[in-house]
Amino acid sequence: MILKKLVIHNFALIKQTSMSFQSGLTVLTGETGAGKSVMVNAIDLAIGNRADKEHIRYGCDSSNVEATFENLSEVKQVVVFREISRSGNSKVKINGQTSSVSHLRSLTSPKIQIVSQHSGQLLMNEENHLAFFDHLAGLTAECELVAKLYANWRLAVDELKRVSNRREQLIKERELLLFQVEEIEKAELRIGEEEELIVERSRLDSVQGLMSSSSLIQEILSSNSDATNASSVQDMISVVRRELENMAIVDSTLSKNVEALTEIEYQLEELRNSVEQYGATLRDDPVRLEEVNLRLDEIYKLKKKYGGSEESVLTTLAEIQERLKKLPNIDDLIDSLIAKEKEQRRIYAKKATELSIARRKAAQDIGELVAHELTELSINDAQFKCELVCEEDDDGIVVNGCGIKPTAYGLETVRFLFSANPGEPLKPLVKTASGGEMSRVLLALKSIELNGDRVKESLLVFDEVDAGIGGQTAVEVGRKLKRLSHRFQVIVITHLHQIARLADHHFVAEKKIDNLSDGRTTITIRDLDKEEIECELNRMVALPEKAGRR
């Protein structure tokens, strides 16, 4: 893949500029403060990185860049257009078709890498060394897997803690539900019982009156009663029946009356027997009355507690029983969560230990490779070591009999140790390396990365990797960049003639005041011919050999 063309409109101090690129080593130079890094920012925007409204030229509503790539994807030529506006909107087009920033980034990210002063700043923070190291060692995927397994394990730990903390609450909830089931089931409630008991209580409350009335009815129906001083109803009806029978002998039309009266006699006999039987059941039973009242009180309490009717109480019982079925056995649940936590811990420990072994194997190789690269960059006696640091933890993951604190990134962190002088011990890179040494360490790390089997990049953009160096060191850095350009398209922003003189193509950034138009300051970037290149190199020789403001 090659970046062929870059067109910039209303970006920072650039009103409009167009650059055509080729393979090999391309440099961009210019006076201090000429705005050389603006081109890097424009490329950064074109490949889908974060847009900053501050890059929009003053007085303009929007800014855009257009980059043309060859062999970026299956299509031979890909034209990327990206526009940002002060309103916050961002427009992306790929070969004229509207697209998204995420799609653009997915196309460009694997093949384009920008190495800037920010990369060196990241290197100055030891917290970033592990990511540098894993990337160099090709262990990024393994580290991401360990991070995922760590997250799964911690979720299992948190779930176990949460359920364990709720154990007492769940036990109390189960005990309450069991008590309620027992209370209702023990009552053996049946539908209609309350109504039956109310009738029975009413009879028991009035038993004396019922017994008296029953006796009186029997006396009236069956025999002479002292209470009435008259014959019984049956005796009187028998007299009437006999008289009607005599009358029917004379007048047969009265026969049906005789039959009716005979039927009445039978019914009265049945009534008397029924009342007699009922009376026989009546007895004054205060014990049973107390039992009925207690049972009704029990039913009323159940209705008040579990529903307004017998049906509601039984429905509530079914609901409670269903809740009990769904309520987990807390001890069984905790046992299963303990087993789950142990298994997640085991899986994490296995992969984290494997990652540690791979890191320790890679650490020595990377240290030797970086030292070799630094030798080529004029630090002849350089020593470089990737120190793996573990934190002991009695409750941690046991490795070789020692407990090690587990983390999301594995069982250790990494810090880079460095020594540039013979006889001097290795010390932390962030405390030892000068600005120039840090630039060369960064370039050495990048060189090792780009020599790996997993390299996908085609375009490398270096911004300010020459900070703090000069003389022969600058020559060696230039040679390193030149060698990289044999494998990649390399664009370098530099202030050093030792690097610029090795370029295959040379651009210069110039800052001018447009007196013919609006009198504003503008930046132009133009390609130099051979004669102009010589003039620019001569100008650069006269400059102090230090990085300046871009």
Image: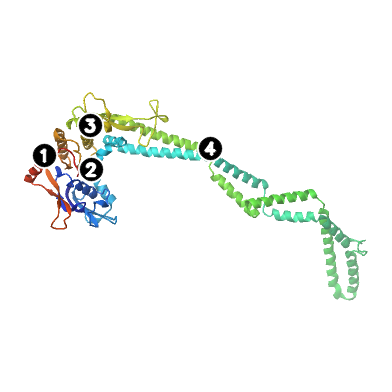
Q: Mark 2: give few (<14), some (14-19) or many (20+) Cα within 10 Å.
A: some
Image coords of residue 270 (percent x, y): 82, 61
Q: Which residue is mark 2?
A: 113
Crowding at label 4, few (<14), some or many (≥20) Cα neighbours within 10 Å? some
Residue 268 vertical position relative to residue 533 in the rendered view, above or below: below
Which residue occupies 24% across, 51% down?
Answer: 55
Where residue 373 appears, as percent x and y from the top left, is 20, 32
Q: Is residue 94 above or below residue 344?
A: below
State the SS at label 2: strand
Q: Which residue is mark 4?
A: 331
Q: Considering only order in the chain, which callout, 4 or 1, is on the residue closer to the N terminus?
A: 4
Whether residues under marks 1 and 3 lie with C-beta atoms below 8 angstroms apart, the answer is: no
Give the spatial CA distance, label 4 vs label 3. Answer: 56 Å
* Dot in front, 2 or 4: 2
Q: CA distance from mark 1 to mark 4?
A: 80 Å
Instruction: Tell me which label, 1 or 2, sits earlier in the chain.
Output: 2
